[in-house]
Amino acid sequence: MNDLVSILIPVYNREEIIAETLDSALAQTYKNIEVIIVDNASTDGTWGIIQRYALSDSRVNAFRNNSNVGPVRNWLRCLEEASGKYGKILWSDDLIAPEFLEKTLPFLDDDDVGFVFTATRIFSSNREIGELCYAIGNTGLYSGDKFIRADLQGENYPVSPGCALFRMKDLRENLILQVPNSVASDFSMHAIGNDLLLFLLVAHKYPKFAFFSEVLSFFRAHEGSISIASEDCKLSLHYNLARSHFVESKRPDLIMRLNEVLHLYLLRHPGSVAYGVKNISDFYVDNKNFRFSWLSLLFFGFKKAFKKYMVL
């Protein structure tokens, strides 16, 4: 396989770390790449650094918005400028190992595989030290339905495509600007949930996904990241809103299962009221089935508590 892979880097105000991110993209052992980097009108020195890379390496295609268009519109601008058959989203504060594309791309030779992701480490300064995430088992193929159900059950599956490789056609089709919701939340601006919805929609489209067990993705934990900067419960709330949209639009057979998840969530996060979410019904736009099994709910709650206890 020698198809062009587009490494997509949306960026805003990352002058201290963007060079390291670009270096990790350009160090790929798989050579047929283009790096599409779109600066969302940064106010620091980010654009100057990007220009220097673009002048010194023809694989870097640099673009800049005239004004800040919000994070998700900037993601979509990356897709607009890309020419590759495959797309690798690389957030501007994250890194990938040199072998990332070489080791993940062969899985997409199989037309039944929608995406491939790798084990990931969350780090602060040294990417070799940190918390291991998304290590779901052995390298290989798994069913798309397993991804969907595992996410609903709160298992350690990815919500960020920064650890994954997709076909470009699926990124363009399933990375959406707004997630329909009943509480007027602007997903285009806070960008929490659009990423998970991408995974769910593609998992629904294909019978399989692939996992590579070696740590080839590195997520940087810092105050400027969306996950760290988000207020208490904002992150989990909007991921649940994205799950609710997916289930009511694509998998109504899972509504009662999701209702159990949402009921437990509301019990544990009373702060969601500040975002207009008080009841299970507030998570949905059209669905009117808010039932769930109390027996299943108790079992699910016990299972999650047991897993937490075992980790501690």
Image: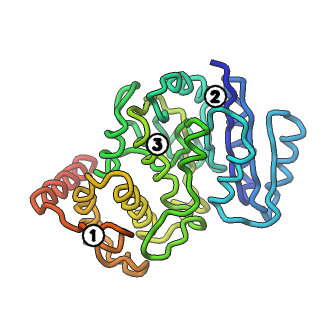
Distance (Cα) linking label 3 and label 2: 26 Å
Amino acid identity at mark 3: Val
Given this view, does label 3 or label 1 mark the residue nearer the observer? 1
Across and down, in percent, residue 197 comes to 46, 53
Pointer 3 residue: 202
Would you identify the image quadrant in which residue 61 lies? top right
State the residue at coordinates (84%, 34%). Answer: 57
Are the residues flagged by discs 1 and 2 in contact, CB closer than 8 Å? Answer: no
Amino acid identity at mark 1: Lys
Indicate which disc, 3 or 1, sits on the residue closer to the N terminus: 3
Distance (Cα) linking label 3 and label 1: 25 Å
User: Which quadrant: the N terminus?
Assistant: top right
Are the residues flagged by discs 3 and 1 in contact, CB closer than 8 Å? Answer: no
Question: What label sits on residue 288 in the rendered view?
Answer: 1
209 vs 98, nearest the viewer: 209
State the residue at coordinates (42%, 74%). Answer: 182
Across and down, in percent, residue 13 comes to 73, 60
Pointer 2 residue: 98
Indicate which disc, 1 or 2, sits on the residue closer to the N terminus: 2
Quick check: 45 above or below 167?
Answer: below
Q: Secondary structure at mark 2?
A: loop
Question: What label sits on residue 136 in the rendered view?
Answer: none
Q: Secondary structure at mark 3?
A: helix
Query: By what rule are the colours in the image chosen?
Result: rainbow
- Can you name the residue that lies furthest to the top here? 1
Would you identify the image quadrant in which residue 81 lies? top right
169 vs 34, nearest the viewer: 169
